[in-house]
Amino acid sequence: MEYGICNLSIIPLRAEPNERSEQVSQVLFGEIFEIKEWKDNWVQIITSFDNYTGWIGRLQFMMLGHLAYKRFKQAPPPLTYRPVTQAWKIANNSILYLPAASSLAFLEGTTCRLGNEQFEIIGEIGETENLLVTATSFLNAPYLWGGRTHFGIDCSGFTQAVFKLQGVNLLRDASMQAEHGYTVTSLNDTRLGDLAFFDNTEGKVVHVGIMLNNEKIIHASGKVKIDTIDAKGIYSEELKRYTHKLCAIKRMF
């Protein structure tokens, strides 16, 4: 088995080995993965964080040895918590702008050592805020299919990112996330941090958001925003109609 680590700020994870293929997710700085297949200028990977499969460019990562991969898995590194954290790449005196929830892999003091590359983290590394502060920091982030950052994010990428910054790992897609946690039977019993799931006419879970209380939800739809929710689902004040049909509420912790 071969392994790799992301040494760029963000790399797109694509459905097929093609620049025109849809972005299904993103790999953030310091995240690691198993390499499944090499194909021309592309590499098929499965991410360690959420077991998601896709294709990345072969010039967009660096190889990682088995012992380093094992060390990372045994002791997950600290994360970045600000929307943007600067990392100084010492070798060529350049700057990487790391999104929130990047992994500060193999951190020694304030220096990440990825193989022969060293990245000095500029400013305070910091600690996580509470869930409400973390979630609302994403407000107005534009919707982006496959996105996981403040500069573009989808509904399940949003819930995954917020929970990752709270130390809880979620799977990547809404339908996957809906398979976990404990069911909350009544909307009146919901509390901050519960996940609400929404299905389509065929009964498939297609959307997810974070409950703020039993009347308000924060979610990514067009942008990250706060809407009203009731037993029917999400009501959009902007559109003056219901936009998502509620099917379940789950408590993850």
Image (cartoon, rainbow, N blue to C red):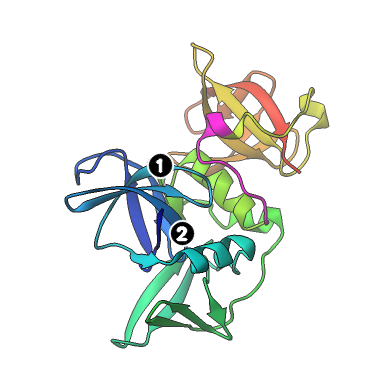
Does residue 102 appear in the picture of this structure? no
State the residue position of label 2. Answer: 32
Image quadrant for the C terminus? Answer: top right
Secondary structure, mark 2, is: strand
The tag on residue 53 is 1
Left or right? Give the position of 15 relative to 162: left
Where in the figure is residue 119, as x and y percent of width and height?
43, 81
Residue drawn at point x = 63 percent, y = 62 percent: 74
Left or right? Give the position of 214 relative to 57: right
Of marks 2 and 1, which one's residue comes earlier in the chain?
2
Give yes or no for contact between labels 2 and 1 (Cβ–Cβ under 8 Å): no
Left or right? Give the position of 225 relative to 192: left
State how many labels appear: 2
The tag on residue 220 is none
**Three-letter amino acid code at the position of disc 1:** Thr
- Examine the rendered structure and indicate whether residue 248 appears above or below residue 210: above
Residue drawn at point x = 36 percent, y = 65 percent: 63
**Three-letter amino acid code at the position of disc 2:** Ile
Where in the figure is residue 224, as x and y percent of width and height?
51, 45
Q: Which residues are magenta?
A: 167-176
Is 253 magenta? The answer is no
